[in-house]
Amino acid sequence: MRSGETQLHLHKAAALLEHAVMSVKQEHPEFSRVEIAGDFRRGCELVSDFVLVVQGLKSTGIEDTTLRLVVTDRKHFGASLLEATGSADHLEQLKTFAADKGFTLDADGLHRGRKLIASATEEEIYQALDLQFIEPELREGSDEIERAAKQKLPALIRDEDLHGILHSHTTASDGTETLEAMAEATRKRGFDYYGVADHSQSAHYAGGLSLQEIAEQHREADRLNKAYNGKFRILKGIEADILADGSLDYPNDILETFDFVVASVHSRFKLPKKEQTERIIEAIGNPRTTIIGHMTGRQLLRRPGYDLDVDKVLKACAKHGVAVEINAHPWRLDLDWRWHQKALDQGCIFSINPDAHSIRELDHMHWGVEMARKGGVPAKRVLNAMRLTALLAHLARRSQTA
């Protein structure tokens, strides 16, 4: 917690910056455009660089305050936005790339000698360098410029690519709303399906479901699905605890009654690395496991993840066709985006889940999308970017294989 005193979680930074944008617009009607930049625009999981780029009649540079305000004119807006967005490593590499092509790139724009080549938009600057446009989330100084030069950057997933929600809780365990209320809120947000995944029986602290409560929830889901008449679907899921030996805390005949199973660690965080890794790989090998939930167990600014060989776990997920969760709760954002490319290279699929315990938390999905974008994940590699029919077919194939 002490290490993050100058940082805010994404959702808290969003509230602060949205308020700042409104205030600037109200106090400065002469600014015709106001854009958020800094590490928030890059989708960083923790935000410390609070900066707005605003368009005025002329450039007045950067005002050093808690909230940095970059005032620029229309002609130089793109260059100012690029500079204020960062990251420092990306900008350094981009300037070197430009220099190798005979250009100079600075806060005023892209120049060849004294001639200004591009500065009004970021797109113009990248295009003038023969680079594919690099989305802000990818600008971390990794290999994005090399890939952009080869036109090999992926089409990143967007909020509108998601067709359903998986891994969410109700009053049956530790949520604040009923199954019907959560499903209806999901439907009203434009999704096609809602996957309930309340806690399993060993999670006594979270009101884990007994066998009788599972049967009751399934009957309620059937009743609601009948009323939806094919226009929306509640999927029957469970968040099953991974026990110390890697088994899930229901027998297979009970797990078979669910449409999907999220397997998660909620105890024994301090197991040695080898044991923790083997425990999770054992759960991945269970034929009823659909998704591995919040793989490392980290909570940002609260606790680090448990000691784990993430590479081995990703290989196991790819081998067994188990989806890697991108837990969209802003305290988690787990799996860390820095592992996403490794997962993609291994052949993994993802599932972007809100881990919602209330209606309001359904909207955490956006932060999961931000993390997926930052990790370079395309929609075609995300489980709940599937339409309902395709998802049901996918789940049926896994069930038949099991």
Image (spheres, rainbow, N blue to C red):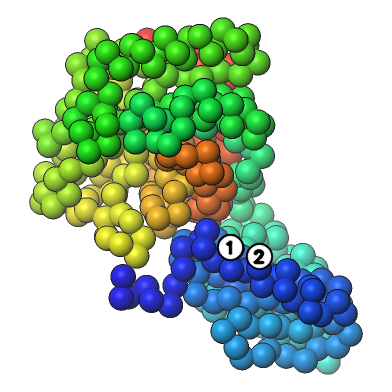
- Residue located at (46% from left, 27% from top): 178
How many residues crowd mark 2 within 10 Å: few (<14), some (14–19), many (20+)?
Answer: few
Number of marks present in the image shown: 2
- Residue located at (81% from left, 80% from top): 28
Comparing 39 with 349, the one in front is 39
- Identify the element where label 2 is drawn: helix
- Residue located at (52% from left, 58% from top): 11
Q: Residue 292 placed where, x, y %?
A: 33, 36
Comparing 43 with 187, the one in front is 187
Instruction: Kindly identify which numbered label has been placed on residue 14.
Output: 1
Viewport quadrant of the C terminus:
top left
Q: Is residue 100 above or below residue 257?
A: below
Q: Amino acid at mark 1?
A: Ala
* Res. 119 in view: no
The quadrant in which residue 344 appears is: top left
- Relative side of 233 to 289, left or right: right
The quadrant in which residue 151 appears is: bottom right
- Relative side of 86 to 235, left or right: right
How many residues crowd mark 1 within 10 Å: few (<14), some (14–19), many (20+)?
Answer: some
Q: Is residue 167 above or below residue 123?
A: above
Comparing 48 with 122, the one in front is 48
Give the alpha-carbon distance from disc 2 to disc 1, as whole Å. Answer: 6 Å
Q: Amino acid at mark 2?
A: Glu
- Identify the element where label 1 is drawn: helix
- Residue located at (79% from left, 83% from top): 72
Viewport quadrant of the N terminus:
bottom left
Q: Residue 16 placed where, x, y %?
A: 59, 68
Q: Which residue is mark 2?
A: 18
Q: Residue 390 placed where, x, y %?
A: 56, 19
Tell me if label 2 and label 1 are in contact, CB under 8 Å.
Answer: yes
- Relative side of 318 to 7, left or right: left
